[in-house]
Image (spheres, rainbow, N blue to C red):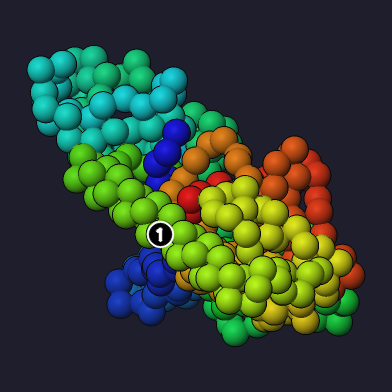
Amino acid sequence: MNRNRKALRFTACCMAAALTLGSAPAPAHAMLPTAGAPAIMSIALDDELKDSFKSRSAGISSNLADCVSSAAVEAAVTVKKEKKSEYADIAIAQVDNYVNVRDSAGEEGNVVGKLYNNSAATVEATEGDWYKITSGNVTGYVKSEFVVCGDEELAKQVSRRVATVQTETLFVRTDPTTESDVLGMVPDQEDLTVTDESENGWTKVAIEEGEGYVSNEYVTKSIEFVTAESKEEEEARLAKEEAERKAAAEAAERKAAEKAAASKKSGGSSGSSGRSASPSGSGGSAVANYACQFVGNPYVYGGSSLTNGADCSGFVMAVYAAFGVGLPHSSSALAGVGYGVSDMQPGDIICYSGHVGIYIGNNTIVHASTPEGGIKYTSPANYRPIIAIRRIF
Protein backbone atom coordinates (compact mmCIF):
# COMPACT_ATOMS: atom_id res chain seq x y z
CA MET A 1 0.00 0.00 0.00
CA ASN A 2 1.58 3.25 -1.14
CA ARG A 3 1.00 5.67 1.66
CA ASN A 4 3.01 7.69 4.12
CA ARG A 5 2.58 6.24 7.56
CA LYS A 6 2.46 9.25 9.85
CA ALA A 7 3.65 8.83 13.37
CA LEU A 8 1.77 9.96 16.47
CA ARG A 9 4.01 10.35 19.44
CA PHE A 10 3.09 10.55 23.08
CA THR A 11 6.09 12.03 24.91
CA ALA A 12 6.57 11.47 28.65
CA CYS A 13 7.15 14.56 30.75
CA CYS A 14 7.27 15.37 34.45
CA MET A 15 5.41 17.95 36.53
CA ALA A 16 5.54 18.86 40.21
CA ALA A 17 2.59 17.64 42.30
CA ALA A 18 1.84 18.05 45.96
CA LEU A 19 -0.44 17.28 48.86
CA THR A 20 -0.82 20.08 51.38
CA LEU A 21 -2.39 20.41 54.80
CA GLY A 22 -3.26 23.95 55.83
CA SER A 23 -0.26 26.14 55.12
CA ALA A 24 2.28 23.31 55.04
CA PRO A 25 4.89 23.37 52.25
CA ALA A 26 4.10 20.95 49.45
CA PRO A 27 6.47 18.03 48.73
CA ALA A 28 7.01 17.47 45.00
CA HIS A 29 6.10 14.22 43.25
CA ALA A 30 6.12 13.01 39.65
CA MET A 31 3.01 13.05 37.48
CA LEU A 32 3.01 11.38 34.07
CA PRO A 33 0.36 12.01 31.40
CA THR A 34 -1.15 8.88 29.90
CA ALA A 35 -1.53 8.57 26.16
CA GLY A 36 -4.92 9.80 25.02
CA ALA A 37 -6.14 10.54 28.54
CA PRO A 38 -5.72 13.15 31.28
CA ALA A 39 -2.66 12.72 33.45
CA ILE A 40 -3.26 10.95 36.72
CA MET A 41 -1.22 12.00 39.71
CA SER A 42 0.92 9.36 41.35
CA ILE A 43 2.21 10.08 44.82
CA ALA A 44 4.23 7.69 46.97
CA LEU A 45 4.00 8.65 50.60
CA ASP A 46 6.78 7.34 52.84
CA ASP A 47 7.09 7.39 56.60
CA GLU A 48 8.84 10.76 56.57
CA LEU A 49 5.94 12.30 54.68
CA LYS A 50 3.45 10.75 57.07
CA ASP A 51 5.33 12.30 60.01
CA SER A 52 5.31 15.67 58.26
CA PHE A 53 1.52 15.65 58.20
CA LYS A 54 1.47 15.12 61.93
CA SER A 55 4.21 17.62 62.80
CA ARG A 56 2.60 20.34 60.66
CA SER A 57 -0.91 19.92 62.11
CA ALA A 58 -0.40 22.37 64.98
CA GLY A 59 -3.59 23.68 66.53
CA ILE A 60 -5.60 20.49 66.16
CA SER A 61 -5.79 17.47 68.41
CA SER A 62 -3.40 14.55 67.92
CA ASN A 63 -6.36 12.29 67.18
CA LEU A 64 -7.59 14.62 64.47
CA ALA A 65 -4.08 14.97 63.06
CA ASP A 66 -3.75 11.18 62.90
CA CYS A 67 -7.15 10.94 61.25
CA VAL A 68 -6.37 13.60 58.66
CA SER A 69 -2.92 12.23 57.83
CA SER A 70 -4.26 8.68 57.54
CA ALA A 71 -7.00 9.85 55.19
CA ALA A 72 -4.46 11.70 53.09
CA VAL A 73 -2.25 8.62 52.92
CA GLU A 74 -5.17 6.39 51.90
CA ALA A 75 -6.27 8.89 49.24
CA ALA A 76 -2.77 9.10 47.80
CA VAL A 77 -2.42 5.31 47.71
CA THR A 78 -5.79 5.05 45.94
CA VAL A 79 -4.69 7.61 43.33
CA LYS A 80 -1.48 5.69 42.75
CA LYS A 81 -3.37 2.45 42.22
CA GLU A 82 -5.70 4.16 39.76
CA LYS A 83 -2.86 5.47 37.59
CA LYS A 84 -3.39 4.14 34.09
CA SER A 85 -0.89 2.71 31.70
CA GLU A 86 0.12 5.08 28.92
CA TYR A 87 -1.38 2.52 26.53
CA ALA A 88 -4.69 2.11 28.39
CA ASP A 89 -6.92 4.51 26.45
CA ILE A 90 -5.63 3.89 22.95
CA ALA A 91 -8.09 2.44 20.41
CA ILE A 92 -6.60 0.40 17.56
CA ALA A 93 -8.14 -0.11 14.10
CA GLN A 94 -8.43 -3.78 13.09
CA VAL A 95 -9.38 -3.86 9.39
CA ASP A 96 -8.11 -5.44 6.18
CA ASN A 97 -6.78 -2.15 4.80
CA TYR A 98 -8.52 0.94 6.12
CA VAL A 99 -11.88 2.16 7.36
CA ASN A 100 -13.38 5.47 6.28
CA VAL A 101 -13.75 8.18 8.91
CA ARG A 102 -16.98 10.12 8.35
CA ASP A 103 -18.25 13.48 9.52
CA SER A 104 -21.39 11.97 11.05
CA ALA A 105 -22.42 8.69 12.66
CA GLY A 106 -23.80 6.89 9.62
CA GLU A 107 -22.92 5.52 6.21
CA GLU A 108 -24.36 8.66 4.64
CA GLY A 109 -21.71 10.84 6.31
CA ASN A 110 -19.02 12.44 4.17
CA VAL A 111 -15.58 10.80 4.24
CA VAL A 112 -13.08 13.06 6.02
CA GLY A 113 -10.20 10.62 6.28
CA LYS A 114 -8.96 7.04 6.46
CA LEU A 115 -8.01 5.04 9.55
CA TYR A 116 -5.58 2.36 8.42
CA ASN A 117 -5.13 -1.08 9.96
CA ASN A 118 -3.27 -0.98 13.30
CA SER A 119 -3.59 2.81 13.42
CA ALA A 120 -4.25 4.42 16.79
CA ALA A 121 -7.05 6.73 17.87
CA THR A 122 -8.79 8.01 20.98
CA VAL A 123 -12.52 7.48 21.40
CA GLU A 124 -14.27 10.75 22.25
CA ALA A 125 -17.88 9.53 22.37
CA THR A 126 -20.26 6.73 21.37
CA GLU A 127 -23.33 7.15 19.19
CA GLY A 128 -25.16 3.87 18.72
CA ASP A 129 -22.72 1.46 17.09
CA TRP A 130 -20.44 4.29 15.99
CA TYR A 131 -17.41 5.78 17.76
CA LYS A 132 -16.42 9.40 17.50
CA ILE A 133 -12.62 9.26 17.28
CA THR A 134 -9.64 11.56 17.03
CA SER A 135 -6.52 10.30 15.27
CA GLY A 136 -3.79 12.61 14.03
CA ASN A 137 -5.53 15.56 12.37
CA VAL A 138 -8.75 13.63 11.81
CA THR A 139 -11.85 13.77 13.99
CA GLY A 140 -14.94 11.88 12.90
CA TYR A 141 -16.92 8.66 13.16
CA VAL A 142 -16.14 4.99 12.48
CA LYS A 143 -18.19 1.83 13.05
CA SER A 144 -17.27 0.43 16.45
CA GLU A 145 -16.79 -3.07 14.98
CA PHE A 146 -13.62 -1.86 13.24
CA VAL A 147 -11.91 -0.52 16.37
CA VAL A 148 -10.58 -2.38 19.42
CA CYS A 149 -10.58 -0.38 22.64
CA GLY A 150 -8.78 -1.04 25.91
CA ASP A 151 -6.43 -3.75 24.62
CA GLU A 152 -3.10 -2.65 26.06
CA GLU A 153 -1.19 -5.60 24.66
CA LEU A 154 -2.42 -4.84 21.13
CA ALA A 155 -1.53 -1.16 21.59
CA LYS A 156 1.99 -2.14 22.64
CA GLN A 157 2.34 -4.51 19.68
CA VAL A 158 1.42 -1.92 17.05
CA SER A 159 3.40 0.93 18.61
CA ARG A 160 7.08 1.66 18.78
CA ARG A 161 8.85 2.99 21.85
CA VAL A 162 11.42 5.51 20.61
CA ALA A 163 14.48 7.20 22.12
CA THR A 164 15.51 10.32 20.18
CA VAL A 165 19.12 11.41 20.51
CA GLN A 166 19.62 14.91 21.91
CA THR A 167 23.37 15.36 21.54
CA GLU A 168 25.76 15.67 18.59
CA THR A 169 27.16 12.15 18.92
CA LEU A 170 25.86 9.63 21.43
CA PHE A 171 27.81 6.58 22.55
CA VAL A 172 25.80 3.37 22.79
CA ARG A 173 27.49 1.22 25.43
CA THR A 174 27.62 -2.51 26.05
CA ASP A 175 26.47 -2.10 29.67
CA PRO A 176 24.54 0.60 31.56
CA THR A 177 27.63 2.43 32.78
CA THR A 178 30.00 5.04 31.37
CA GLU A 179 32.90 2.71 32.14
CA SER A 180 31.69 0.04 29.70
CA ASP A 181 32.84 -0.35 26.10
CA VAL A 182 31.30 1.68 23.28
CA LEU A 183 29.17 -0.57 21.08
CA GLY A 184 28.45 2.10 18.47
CA MET A 185 27.81 5.79 17.86
CA VAL A 186 24.65 7.54 16.70
CA PRO A 187 24.14 11.16 15.60
CA ASP A 188 21.85 13.89 16.88
CA GLN A 189 18.08 13.44 16.31
CA GLU A 190 18.44 9.76 15.45
CA ASP A 191 15.38 7.71 16.45
CA LEU A 192 16.26 4.44 18.16
CA THR A 193 13.89 1.62 19.05
CA VAL A 194 13.73 1.06 22.81
CA THR A 195 13.99 -2.58 23.89
CA ASP A 196 14.22 -2.20 27.68
CA GLU A 197 13.88 0.54 30.29
CA SER A 198 14.48 -1.39 33.49
CA GLU A 199 17.97 -0.02 34.20
CA ASN A 200 17.92 3.07 36.39
CA GLY A 201 19.08 6.08 34.35
CA TRP A 202 19.74 4.02 31.21
CA THR A 203 17.69 2.81 28.24
CA LYS A 204 18.45 -0.23 26.10
CA VAL A 205 18.15 0.45 22.37
CA ALA A 206 18.70 -1.35 19.08
CA ILE A 207 21.39 -0.26 16.62
CA GLU A 208 23.19 -2.04 13.77
CA GLU A 209 25.92 -3.37 16.08
CA GLY A 210 23.31 -4.94 18.38
CA GLU A 211 21.51 -3.88 21.53
CA GLY A 212 23.22 -1.47 23.89
CA TYR A 213 22.58 1.21 26.46
CA VAL A 214 22.23 4.99 26.26
CA SER A 215 22.05 7.43 29.13
CA ASN A 216 18.60 8.92 29.69
CA GLU A 217 20.33 12.27 30.05
CA TYR A 218 20.89 12.42 26.29
CA VAL A 219 17.61 11.12 24.88
CA THR A 220 13.92 11.95 24.94
CA LYS A 221 11.46 9.07 24.87
CA SER A 222 8.11 8.77 23.17
CA ILE A 223 5.60 6.27 21.85
CA GLU A 224 5.03 6.20 18.12
CA PHE A 225 1.72 5.14 16.59
CA VAL A 226 0.39 5.25 13.05
CA THR A 227 -2.60 7.61 12.80
CA ALA A 228 -5.41 8.43 10.42
CA GLU A 229 -4.85 10.40 7.24
CA SER A 230 -7.24 13.21 6.37
CA LYS A 231 -8.67 13.56 2.88
CA GLU A 232 -6.59 16.69 2.32
CA GLU A 233 -3.43 15.00 3.58
CA GLU A 234 -3.99 12.04 1.29
CA GLU A 235 -4.42 14.29 -1.74
CA ALA A 236 -1.28 16.26 -0.87
CA ARG A 237 0.71 13.06 -0.31
CA LEU A 238 -0.31 11.54 -3.63
CA ALA A 239 0.57 14.74 -5.47
CA LYS A 240 3.96 14.89 -3.72
CA GLU A 241 4.72 11.25 -4.50
CA GLU A 242 3.89 11.74 -8.17
CA ALA A 243 6.08 14.85 -8.35
CA GLU A 244 8.98 13.02 -6.67
CA ARG A 245 8.66 10.05 -9.02
CA LYS A 246 8.67 12.38 -12.02
CA ALA A 247 11.65 14.38 -10.74
CA ALA A 248 13.63 11.22 -9.96
CA ALA A 249 12.92 9.76 -13.40
CA GLU A 250 13.96 12.99 -15.11
CA ALA A 251 17.16 13.11 -13.05
CA ALA A 252 18.00 9.54 -14.03
CA GLU A 253 17.36 10.30 -17.69
CA ARG A 254 19.65 13.33 -17.53
CA LYS A 255 22.40 11.25 -15.98
CA ALA A 256 22.04 8.58 -18.65
CA ALA A 257 22.13 11.22 -21.41
CA GLU A 258 25.21 12.85 -19.89
CA LYS A 259 26.96 9.48 -19.71
CA ALA A 260 26.09 8.70 -23.34
CA ALA A 261 27.37 12.09 -24.47
CA ALA A 262 30.60 11.68 -22.52
CA SER A 263 31.10 8.19 -23.93
CA LYS A 264 30.55 9.42 -27.48
CA LYS A 265 32.95 12.31 -27.00
CA SER A 266 35.68 9.97 -25.72
CA GLY A 267 35.29 7.63 -28.67
CA GLY A 268 33.13 5.04 -26.98
CA SER A 269 35.33 4.44 -23.95
CA SER A 270 33.30 3.65 -20.88
CA GLY A 271 35.94 5.14 -18.61
CA SER A 272 37.53 3.44 -15.66
CA SER A 273 35.98 0.21 -14.47
CA GLY A 274 35.69 -1.22 -10.98
CA ARG A 275 34.35 0.29 -7.84
CA SER A 276 34.05 3.87 -9.15
CA ALA A 277 32.19 3.16 -12.39
CA SER A 278 29.46 5.63 -13.30
CA PRO A 279 25.81 4.60 -12.89
CA SER A 280 24.15 2.97 -15.87
CA GLY A 281 20.43 3.16 -16.68
CA SER A 282 17.65 4.49 -14.48
CA GLY A 283 15.14 3.24 -11.97
CA GLY A 284 15.44 1.12 -8.84
CA SER A 285 17.32 -1.76 -10.48
CA ALA A 286 19.98 0.63 -11.77
CA VAL A 287 20.36 2.06 -8.26
CA ALA A 288 20.76 -1.44 -6.80
CA ASN A 289 23.32 -2.47 -9.42
CA TYR A 290 25.33 0.70 -8.91
CA ALA A 291 25.35 0.32 -5.12
CA CYS A 292 26.65 -3.25 -5.28
CA GLN A 293 29.97 -2.30 -6.85
CA PHE A 294 31.08 -0.64 -3.61
CA VAL A 295 30.83 -3.79 -1.49
CA GLY A 296 34.09 -4.26 0.41
CA ASN A 297 34.78 -0.57 0.83
CA PRO A 298 35.14 0.81 4.38
CA TYR A 299 32.59 2.10 6.87
CA VAL A 300 33.43 5.55 8.24
CA TYR A 301 31.18 7.22 10.81
CA GLY A 302 29.89 10.49 9.34
CA GLY A 303 31.40 9.70 5.94
CA SER A 304 29.72 9.81 2.53
CA SER A 305 32.44 8.60 0.17
CA LEU A 306 31.56 5.45 -1.74
CA THR A 307 35.23 4.61 -2.16
CA ASN A 308 36.96 6.07 0.90
CA GLY A 309 34.27 5.35 3.47
CA ALA A 310 30.67 6.11 4.38
CA ASP A 311 28.26 5.39 7.19
CA CYS A 312 24.86 3.84 6.51
CA SER A 313 22.95 7.00 5.60
CA GLY A 314 25.97 8.53 3.87
CA PHE A 315 26.16 5.44 1.65
CA VAL A 316 22.48 5.67 0.64
CA MET A 317 22.80 9.43 0.11
CA ALA A 318 25.90 9.06 -2.10
CA VAL A 319 24.42 6.24 -4.20
CA TYR A 320 21.29 8.24 -4.98
CA ALA A 321 23.32 11.41 -5.57
CA ALA A 322 24.89 9.61 -8.54
CA PHE A 323 21.39 9.49 -10.05
CA GLY A 324 20.73 13.18 -9.39
CA VAL A 325 18.60 12.62 -6.29
CA GLY A 326 19.38 14.62 -3.16
CA LEU A 327 18.72 12.81 0.12
CA PRO A 328 19.44 13.66 3.77
CA HIS A 329 22.43 12.28 5.66
CA SER A 330 20.30 10.73 8.43
CA SER A 331 18.74 7.28 8.68
CA SER A 332 15.75 8.65 10.61
CA ALA A 333 15.18 11.36 7.98
CA LEU A 334 15.46 8.79 5.18
CA ALA A 335 12.39 7.08 6.65
CA GLY A 336 10.37 10.03 5.33
CA VAL A 337 11.73 10.44 1.79
CA GLY A 338 10.01 9.27 -1.39
CA TYR A 339 6.86 7.31 -0.64
CA GLY A 340 6.10 4.36 1.59
CA VAL A 341 5.45 0.87 0.21
CA SER A 342 4.84 -2.54 1.73
CA ASP A 343 6.58 -4.68 -0.90
CA MET A 344 10.34 -4.46 -1.41
CA GLN A 345 11.76 -3.87 -4.88
CA PRO A 346 15.37 -3.24 -6.00
CA GLY A 347 16.47 0.29 -5.18
CA ASP A 348 14.09 0.71 -2.23
CA ILE A 349 15.49 2.28 0.93
CA ILE A 350 15.06 -0.06 3.91
CA CYS A 351 14.97 1.68 7.29
CA TYR A 352 15.76 0.06 10.64
CA SER A 353 16.31 1.40 14.16
CA GLY A 354 19.33 3.67 13.74
CA HIS A 355 20.27 2.13 10.39
CA VAL A 356 19.41 2.09 6.68
CA GLY A 357 20.31 0.14 3.54
CA ILE A 358 19.32 -0.40 -0.12
CA TYR A 359 17.33 -3.42 -1.24
CA ILE A 360 18.87 -5.22 -4.22
CA GLY A 361 16.46 -8.13 -4.66
CA ASN A 362 16.53 -11.79 -3.56
CA ASN A 363 15.70 -10.77 0.02
CA THR A 364 19.06 -8.98 0.30
CA ILE A 365 20.24 -5.46 1.14
CA VAL A 366 23.55 -3.71 0.51
CA HIS A 367 24.59 -1.32 3.27
CA ALA A 368 27.43 0.33 5.12
CA SER A 369 27.16 -1.91 8.14
CA THR A 370 29.76 -1.33 10.87
CA PRO A 371 33.45 -0.40 11.11
CA GLU A 372 34.18 -4.13 11.21
CA GLY A 373 31.85 -5.12 8.37
CA GLY A 374 32.21 -2.17 6.00
CA ILE A 375 29.92 -2.01 2.97
CA LYS A 376 28.45 -5.47 2.55
CA TYR A 377 25.46 -7.62 1.64
CA THR A 378 23.03 -8.89 4.28
CA SER A 379 20.24 -11.44 3.87
CA PRO A 380 17.46 -11.75 4.77
CA ALA A 381 16.44 -8.11 4.47
CA ASN A 382 14.37 -8.39 7.64
CA TYR A 383 17.34 -9.58 9.71
CA ARG A 384 16.24 -6.78 12.01
CA PRO A 385 12.74 -5.28 12.41
CA ILE A 386 12.02 -3.00 9.44
CA ILE A 387 10.75 0.47 10.38
CA ALA A 388 9.89 1.66 6.85
CA ILE A 389 10.33 0.88 3.16
CA ARG A 390 10.72 3.99 1.01
CA ARG A 391 10.70 4.14 -2.77
CA ILE A 392 12.24 6.93 -4.84
CA PHE A 393 11.78 5.67 -8.41
Provide residue 167's location: percent of width, then percent of height. 58, 82
Looking at the image, which is closer to me, 321 or 220? 321
Q: Residue furthest front?
A: 267
The number of numbered discs placed on residues in the rendered structure image is: 1
Residue 255 falls left or right of residue 271: left
Q: Which quarter of the picture shows residue 304? A: bottom right
Task: Report whether residue 297 is seen.
Answer: yes
Q: Quadrant of the N terminus?
A: top left
Q: Residue at x 81, y 69 (%)?
A: 274
Residue nearest the viewer, comparing 341 with 77:
341
Residue drawn at 43 percent across, 29 percent down: 117
Side of 299 relative to 35 (left or right): right
Q: Nearer the viewer, residue 221 or 376?
A: 376
Q: Residues within 10 Å of mark 1 (few under 14, many from 20)?
A: some
Query: What x and y, as percent, mark residue 356?
Result: 65, 59
Mark yes or no: residue 388 visible.
Answer: no
Percent x, y of residue 179 = 86, 82
Quadrant in the rendering for residue 209: bottom right
Which quadrant of the view contains residue 216? bottom right
Residue 350 % position (x, y): 62, 51
What amino acid is labelled 1 in the image?
Glu
Whether residue 64 sits left or right of residue 344 in the image: it is left
Tell me: residue 372, above or below residue 33. Answer: below
| Residue under numbered circle 1 | 250
Instruction: Please tell me whether mark 1 sits on a helix, a strand or a loop.
Output: helix
- Residue drawn at the location 38% of the way across and 32% of the way down: 116
Q: Residue at x 76, y 75 (%)?
A: 272
